[in-house]
Amino acid sequence: MIKVDLSKAKLAESVESYKDQVASIHDMIHNKTGAGNDFLGWVDLPLNYDKEEAEAIKAKVDELKDEIDVLLVCGIGGSYLGARAAIEALNGLFPTNKVEIIYVGNTFSSNYIAQVKEYVKDKEFAINCISKSGTTTETSIAFRIFKDMLEKTKGKEVARKRIIATTDKAKGALKTLSNNEGYTTFVVPDDVGGRYSVLTAVGLFPIAMAGIDIDALLAGAAKAREDLNNPNIEENPAYQYGVARQILCKQGYPAEMFVTYELQLQMTAEWWKQLFGESEGKEGKGILPTSATFSTDLHSLGQFIQEGTKVLYETVLKIEKPISDIEIPSDPDNLDNLNYLAGKTVDFVNKKACEGTIDAHVNTGGVPNIQITMDELTPYTYGYMIYFFEKACALSVYLLDVNPFNQPGVEVYKKNMFKLLGKPGA
Ligand code: PA5
């Protein structure tokens, strides 16, 4: 389902030489014996996810989908990136699904929040507030603003039906409020961290509201769980990728650029950046995750990649078959000299751009290149891809002897901010 090609990665060591280390980390992941082992719920999630909750998610979607125009997904970081990545990847940037998904709670930008308020003021909207802790400031502020708006325009009764909280099963401010108000609630499992939570209700409810088949998404992830539950690196592409990136880091490439050729995969890159950046960037270690969308960014960052400081390697996510393709028309005047492409498709050009760019970056620019290929973008393959990167990330970070599942560094700015804001007790 996913192929990893390391033939252009310029690896100084073979990934197979990590065979024993990989096998023992594989055991650590599956037997839950490594650092952060209380956050390994994602490993078996595609099999033992809460089936009743999945049905409740679909029932809530059925209840709301004809009644609302907009779903406000209110969350930040791991509480929204996965859903947004999947929705944009699968529905594209101009979706035809009746319910429009808009993301709030991910910023303190008053400009943005005010614009969303203006945009939804004459629309029927619902709010899915997603917060494991229930206390994240960006999310809580936006939720307070839009909850107030909904209650004032529609009344408390309607608001109660249109607010869905995804949070801890028992504790936190959002859970308490939900109990008091009688909101529908979905659960963020204790043993799944934010950046690994897309296949829980955190991702599943918004993804289902966007009209995407969550059963297929979970089935794809389950297939990946089966395929990648293999300690043998020679047969496990997720582990090959996870090891290759650490070899390149050791070779003097501290930055990884995640490249796609699809604008609708930009949020997938954002999700990937959080997954790897927050899992790995600790104790003065880790690879800086960056991203680019080609050919768009070949007209900006392309220069640096080709001839700038040699700090990065590229990981290209290739999709063999586009969701839709367009034929380039013939033009009798041919003033743009494009008739040599008439009858070819835009995706054909995209593929040639990819081929030519890899050659230019690898052979002329000396930039190592990892290629990851998927057949197509469907809910099933996307579910597979999510699990692939989660597994690769866990293995890769354990190779660095770092706990992949905590994020102690993200608290520092919050402490300063709370002091400056005069938060009681800060
Ligand atoms: O991965 C993480 O842990 C973070 O990105 C969190 O998901 C993010 O900070 C939001 O936290 P919460 O879900 O508690 O509101």
Image (spheres, rainbow, N blue to C red):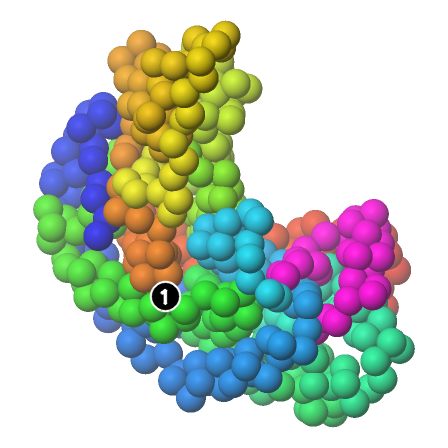
In the image: residue 10, left or right of residue 141: left
In the image: residue 271, left or right of residue 371: right
Quarter where residue 118 is shown? bottom right
User: Which amino acid type corresponds to the residue marked 1 in the rendered image?
Assistant: Leu
Inspect this view and state whether residue 251 appears: no
Q: Which corner quadrant holds the C terminus?
A: bottom right
Taking the magenta stretch, the answer to whether it contains residue 121 is yes
In the image: residue 195, left or right of residue 236: right
Q: Which residue is mark 1?
A: 217
Quarter where residue 149 is shown? bottom right
| x, y percent for residue 346 | 39, 30
Inspect this view and state whether residue 25 appears: yes
Q: Is residue 413 above or below residue 42?
A: above
Taking the magenta stretch, the answer to whether it contains residue 239 is no
Q: Residue at x 45, y 25 (%)?
A: 295
| x, y percent for residue 129 | 66, 71
Label 1 CB sits under 8 Å from any ligand 1 atom? no
Query: Which region is colored magenta?
Result: 100-127
Quarter where residue 104 is shown? bottom right
In the image: residue 101, left or right of residue 51: right
Q: Residue at x 50, y 67 (%)?
A: 211
| x, y percent for residue 285 | 43, 40
Q: Is residue 61 above or below residue 333?
A: below
| x, y percent for residue 345 | 35, 30
What element does badge 1 sit on? helix
Relative depth, front residue between 89 and 331: 331
Q: Residue at x 29, y 69 (%)?
A: 219
Q: Residue at x 40, y 64 (%)?
A: 36
Relative depth, front residue between 388 and 382: 382
Query: Is the residue marked by circle 1 packed among few (<14), some (14-19), or many (20+) residues within 10 Å?
Result: many
